[in-house]
Amino acid sequence: MNTVKIRNIEVGKGMPKVIVPIVGKTREEIVSRGRELSGMDLDMVEWRVDFYDDVFDTEKVLETLKELREALGEKALLFTFRTRKEGGEKEIDADAYTRLNSAVADSGNADALDVEIFSGDDVVRRNIDAIHTAGKVVIGSNHDFFRTPSKSDLIYRLRKMQDMKADIPKIAVMPQNKDDVLTLLSATEEMKNYADRPIITMSMSAAGVISRLCGEVFGSAMTFGTVGAASAPGQIPVEQLKESMKILHSAL
C-alpha cells in the first residue's frame, strides 16, 4: 500500500493520524480555535465549513481560511463542506459545491479537501480534477447516519472511492448493534486486499467507539477526536484517543 503525504504527515504509516474538527460559526471563533489547536498533540485539523455563518460568501470563506492557515502554523488542514444529506449543517447545489472546493484548492491554504463520492459521478470528477490540478489531496467520503450497510456494500463503496481517484477513501456508518460494528471492522480488514492507498473507516456513536481506537489493527489510517465540540457522534477527546492508540501500538 502506498502512503499519502499531507503537509508534514504521512498517512498510512505507523499509528492512525488524529484529526480534530473546528465547527465554529464565526471567523473569530474559528481562528481562535485554530490557534488553540496549533500547539496540541494532533495531526490534522478539519474545518467543517458547513457550520460557518458566511459559508456561501466565497470571499469571506477564503479570507477566514487564510487566517486559519496562519493560526495553525504547520498543522495539516482539511477543508470539508458536509452536505445535509450526509449529516452536515447546510444544503448546497452541485455547481456551488464545485466552485467552493475549486476556489479553496486554488488558494493553497488547505492541504486536503473532502469530496462526497456519491454526489453524482460528473460532479465528483469535476471536484477531484480541480483539487488534483491544484496539487491538493482528496479525501473521498460517504456517511450513513442511519444504518450500517452490508460488508459487500461497504467494500463496494470504498472501492468506488478508489476508482474515482480519491487519494484517501473514507466511510462512516451508524451501528444498530454490536454486529454492525464487527461488519465495519471486517470490511476494513478485507478492503486491505483491494486498497493501494490508505483508507479511513469508522462506526459512529458510543456503540462504535472501538472502531475509532483500533485502526492500526484493522486498517483504518486516520481517526477523529475532539477538543470541545464534536462533529459526529462517538468522537473521543483527543488526549484519551492518543493514549489508547499508543497502548495498542506498543503491543503490535
Image (tube, grey):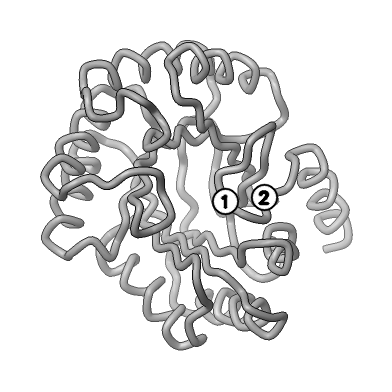
Q: Which amino acid does label 2 sit on?
A: Gln
- Up-down: is 141 above or below 153? above
Marks 1 & 2, CB-CB < 8 Å contact: yes
Q: What residue type is labelled 1?
A: Ala
Report the disc number at residue 232.
1
Q: Residue at x 36, y 56 (%)?
A: 140
Which residue is label 2 attached to?
A: 235
Q: Residue at x 15, y 40 (%)?
A: 96
- Up-down: is 38 above or below 248? above
Q: Position of residue 249 (x, y in %)?
A: 81, 55
Where the C terminus falls, by quadrant? bottom right
Q: Residue at x 21, y 17 (%)?
A: 59
Nearer to me, 231 or 141: 231
Q: What SS does tag 1 mark?
A: loop
Q: Where is residue 121 in the image (x, y as percent from the top left)?
A: 16, 65
Nearer to me, 59 or 145: 145
Gap in Å between the C-alphas at discs 1 and 2?
Answer: 6 Å
Report the disc number at residue 86.
none
- Up-down: is 133 above or below 155? above
Q: Which residue is drawn at 73% across and 47% down?
A: 236
